[in-house]
Every structure is written in structure tokens, then in C-alpha cells.
């Protein structure tokens, strides 16, 4: 499964599928500089928490390659700091971006005694490893979560937490893919995810390619379907998980969690442990990215509203209390999350 590459390191260039153009066109963008990678992250060429983590690591590797081998270790670290800061300013909410940058910088600080040329190669290998590990992680998330998905059931998902948002397989869609591959008769309802339409454009595209039954709804239809017994579970990804179990995910996730709670429908979150931010104590501390209001007032470059201001928060916070279970590559976590997540948080420090 996954007949496309979200992102790939190829001959010292980074290739990524242009997610802004999907599902209409399948085109790949080639980046040769860290600035180009940053632009791709900001403009949503590549999006989804784990995928932007991989992109930022590859951006750091590209940045390192532009530095001369003759540079001193001190000057190299100074240049890499500027590159890290540039990449870190792209999008504030998904912690994977910062997690990957920190991991690359940790490697640099462990290489104090090595030649700059060697460090550059190690950074390249580390970025590629982050990608390889993410694929394995997603497969494990899928295997761990599949048991929660009942045979003959309908799963509602929001935004895109699929292969396009990761190195492949996906987190929430990884669970769906794994359950489907186990032979379970499942079908998916994808909410369109206004304003950027990740659900309508990307999730339906991925699932359709894999032959997994999927139906599209507008965001406002979810409550009605739940009230008519047409949804058996809700399964989403996350951009950041606070240590108390609150999560940030695509705008609209919070409303779905309330609807699910009201209708007694289990609400699951699938995410790698790299999305758990042990330093963040609760959801209210998570910075919510505010995007260009034109994403709301315009569609395909055409104005769809009167000339008014719009509000465009890209994410919202779902309180831990609404989450039945957090599915990760190392297992399933339940309430109270302060307690169940504490071991992982300690280990990741
Ligand atoms: O703005 P986006 O498209 O980057 O938002 C993506 C999401 O909210 C996903 O649900 C989340 O990153 C999890 S992806 C495995």
C-alpha cells in the first residue's frame, strides 16, 4: 500500500509530492536548499506533523551541505543554529517539527571532535533515518490500533493523518489501513476539513487508491450522522499531545470530540510518541497557528464571502477527557494520561 512517496532524499535533493495540487495533479517539487524546504512547509506543499518533522530534518541536512568542509566546528554550529531557527519559524503547532530539529542539533553537539565533512554526512544519514523510523512507527501504530476497530464498522476521520502526513502508512489512516489489511469490513467517513480541505482532497485520494471504502461529508454533517447511528468510532491524528493528554489537531477536531462524547461514540487519537510534548503541561499552553484569512474567504483563488474579515485558527485543542485512547507505536494509553504517559515522557527526556 502507499503507491506514492510523500518525501524522499534523492541525490542530495529533497523531492516531495505537492499536496496543494492533489487530487487533481500528482506533481513532485524538488528542493535543493533549506530555504526552499521552509517555504514548502509554510505553504503546505508538505503538511502533517510527522511529515513536517522529516522535512525539517532534511532541510537541516541540505543546509549543512551548503557549508564548506573547511569551516571550523564553531562556525558550523553557528550556521546550523541560523538554519534551525529559519526552519523552526515555519509552523508553530506540530511538535514533530521541533522534535526533529532538536534531534539533528543533538547530533551536532555530540560530534564536537569530528571533522565538519563527517558531521555533514552524519546529518544526512540522520534525516534519512528519521524518515525510515517514521514508516516503521506508523506500521506499529497501525498494528496496535487495529484491535480497536470493530469488524463491520464505520470510522469517521478528520483532516489527513495518512501516508501523506507521514513517511507512509499514516497514523489514524495507518490504523484504518492495518484493520482493513486484517480483513475487517470497514468503511470510512472523511470530513472535508474546511478551509484547506485535507479530508476532501487528500484522505479520500489516499483511501480510494488503496480500495478502502470512503464517503465524503462536509464538516457540519458529522453530528447528524452520529445521531442516526451511522458512525461507530472517530479516529484522528494529533499535532501535539500535552503531558495531561490534551491534544492539538486540525481545526474541527474538538467539535467532533464533543459530538462523539454526546453520542457515546469512542474517540481515538493515533500519534507517534514523538508527538508527545512532555514539557507542555496542558492544551492551553499549545500555540495555535493562525493562517491567512484568505483561506476562509476564498476558494481556488475566488472570493466566496462578502468583503469581511475572517478568523482562521488552523488547529484546536481536544481535552484529554474526551479521548478514549491514545494509540502509539509503543502501545495504547488510557486515562488518566498524566499517569499513563509519565513513563514515556521520562524516557524521552
Ligand atoms: O495543517 P496540517 O494539514 O498540517 O494539519 C495536519 C493535521 O492536523 C493532522 O491531523 C496531524 O498533523 C496528524 S498527521 C499524522
Image (tube, rainbow, N blue to C red):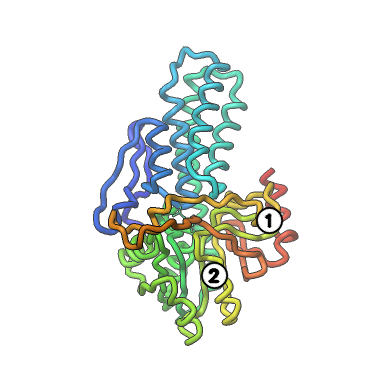
Q: Is residue 147 above or below residue 113?
A: below
**Mark seen at residue 200:** none
Vertical position of residue 51 compared to residue 141: above or below: above
| Farthest residue, direction bottom | 228
Name the quadrant of the N terminus: bottom left
Q: Is residue 109 visible?
A: yes
Q: Position of residue 236 (x, y in %)?
A: 51, 64
Residue marked by disc 2: 255
Q: Is residue 214 visible?
A: no
Disc 2 to disc 1, C-alpha distance: 18 Å
Q: Earlier in the sequence, mark 2 or mark 1?
A: 2
As drawn, is 96 to the left or to the right of 205?
right
Could you tell me which residue is drawn at 38 percent across and 61 percent down?
A: 197
**Picture residue at 54% right of the left edge, 34% below the top:** 104
Identify which residue, 266 or 196, lies in the foreground: 196
Q: Secondary structure at mark 1?
A: loop
Please say if 320 is above or below 213: above
The quarter of the picture where residue 282 lies is: bottom right
Label 1: how many residues lie within 10 Å, few (<14), some (14-19) or many (20+)? many
Q: Which residue is mark 1?
A: 282
Q: Residue 60 at x, y = what percent?
A: 47, 32
The residue furthest front is 307
**Residue 301, picture quadrant:** bottom left
Residue 54: x, y in percent?
A: 47, 43
User: Residue lying furthest right in this view?
Assistant: 339
Is 7 situated above or below 343? above
Q: Is residue 24 left or right of residue 341?
A: left
Amino acid at each position: 500500500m502507499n503507491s506514492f512517496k510523500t518525501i524522499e532524499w534523492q541525490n542530495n535533493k529533497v523531492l516531495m509530492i505537492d499536496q496543494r495540487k492533489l487530487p487533481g495533479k500528482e506533481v513532485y517539487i524538488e528542493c535543493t536548499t533549506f530555504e526552499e524546504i521552509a517555504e514548502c512547509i509554510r505553504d503546505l506543499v508538505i503538511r502533517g506533523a510527522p511529515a513536517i518533522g522529516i522535512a525539517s530534518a532534511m532541510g537541516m541536512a541540505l543546509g549543512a551541505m551548503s557549508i564548506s568542509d573547511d569551516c571550523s566546528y564553531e562556525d558550523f554550529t553557528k550556521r546550523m543554529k541560523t538554519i534551525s531557527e529559519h526552519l523552526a519559524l515555519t509552523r508553530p503547532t506540530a511538535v514533530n517539527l521541533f522534535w526533529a530539529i532538536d534531534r539533528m542539533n543533538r547530533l551536532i553537539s555530540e560530534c564536537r571532535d569530528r571533522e565538519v565533512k563527517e558531521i555533514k554526512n552524519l546529518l544526512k544519514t540522520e534525516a534519512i533515518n528519521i524518515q525510515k523510523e517514521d514508516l516503521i512507527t506508523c506500521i506499529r501504530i497501525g498494528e496496535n490500533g487495529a484491535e480497536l476497530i470493530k469488524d463491520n464498522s464505520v470510522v469517521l476521520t478528520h483532516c489527513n493523518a495518512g501516508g501523506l502526513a507521514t513517511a507512509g502508512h499514516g497514523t489514524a489512516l495507518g490504523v484504518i489501513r492495518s484493520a482493513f489489511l486484517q480483513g475487517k469490513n470497514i468503511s470510512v467517513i472523511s470530513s472535508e476539513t474546511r478551509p484547506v480541505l485535507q479530508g476532501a482532497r487528500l484522505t479520500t485520494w489516499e483511501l480510494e487508491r488503496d480500495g478502502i471504502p470512503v464517503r465524503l461529508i462536509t464538516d457540519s454533517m458529522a453530528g447528524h450522522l452520529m445521531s442516526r447511528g451511522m458512525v461507530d468510532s472517530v479516529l484522528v491524528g494529533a499535532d501535539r499531545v500535552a503531558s495531561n493528554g490534551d491534544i492539538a489537531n486540525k481545526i474541527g477536531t474538538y467539535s467532533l470530540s464533543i459530538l462523539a462524547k454526546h453520542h457515546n461514540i469512542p474517540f481515538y487519537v493515533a500519534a507517534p510518541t514523538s508527538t508527545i510534548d512532555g514539557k507542555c503541561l496542558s492544551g492551553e499552553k499549545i500555540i495555535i497557528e493562525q493562517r491567512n484569512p484568505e483561506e476562509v474567504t476564498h476558494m481556488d483563488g475566488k472570493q466566496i464571502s462578502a468583503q469581511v474579515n475572517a478568523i482562521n485558527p488552523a488547529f484546536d485543542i481536544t481535552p484529554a477527557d474526551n479521548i478514549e485512547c491514545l494509540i502509539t507505536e509503543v502501545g495504547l494509553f488510557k486515562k488518566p494520561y498524566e499517569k499513563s504517559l509519565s513513563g514515556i515522557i521520562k524516557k524521552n527526556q
